[in-house]
Amino acid sequence: MIFDLKVYWQRGVSTQQIPSTSDMPIKLENPFKEPPKKCILCGVSVNYKNVQLLSQFISPYTGRIFGRHITGLCGKKQKEISKSIKKAQRMGFMSVMLKDPAFIKDPNICDYKIWE
């Protein structure tokens, strides 16, 4: 039921108007809202034997593991990558101090620049 009552003002007495549904604003999505950032490894299994993937997350000069602010991974995948790198280093698949020269020319997954 749609009621269109007019408001009458008298001394201290007023009646309220009930709005009709045709004048109600339509809810729209925010056009300026950025899409949520997604982890690049979510949905990908990480294995300590995949040295080429793991080498993307270590520094080519020092061998240190990049942090989350550089890799852009979620916390779960960052921890999984770190554990896999450590395991690959202990098993002898990866060097501890340097990145394997065969993987230096690979495209960067992370936001870092290699000084040449």
Image (cartoon, rainbow, N blue to C red):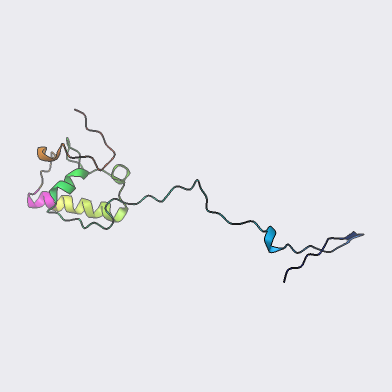
SS majority, magenta: helix
From the viewer's perspective, is 103 left or right of 30?
Answer: left
Residue closer to the observer: 35 or 2: 2
Residue 15 image-quadrant placement = bottom right
User: Foreground: 27 or 106?
Assistant: 27
Residues 14 and 55: in front is 14
Q: Is residue 55 above or below residue 77?
A: above
Magenta run includes residue 92: yes
Residue drawn at 78 percent across, 62 percent down: 17
- Choose top left, top right, bottom left or bottom right for residue 28: bottom right
Residue pushed farthest bottom?
1
Residue drawn at (25%, 33%) of the image: 113
* Farthest front residue in view: 22
Q: Establish if 87 lies above or below 71.
A: below
Q: From what the image shows, is residue 46 above or below residue 63? A: below
Q: Quadrant of the C terminus?
A: top left
Question: How far across and how far down the image is residue 4, in percent?
Answer: 78, 65
Q: Is residue 115 magenta?
A: no
| Image coordinates for residue 101, horizontal then vertical, percent | 10, 37
Would residue 92 be found to the left or right of residue 38 on screen?
A: left
Residue at screen point 50% across, 45% down: 32
Where residue 87 appears, as percent x and y from the top left, is 14, 53
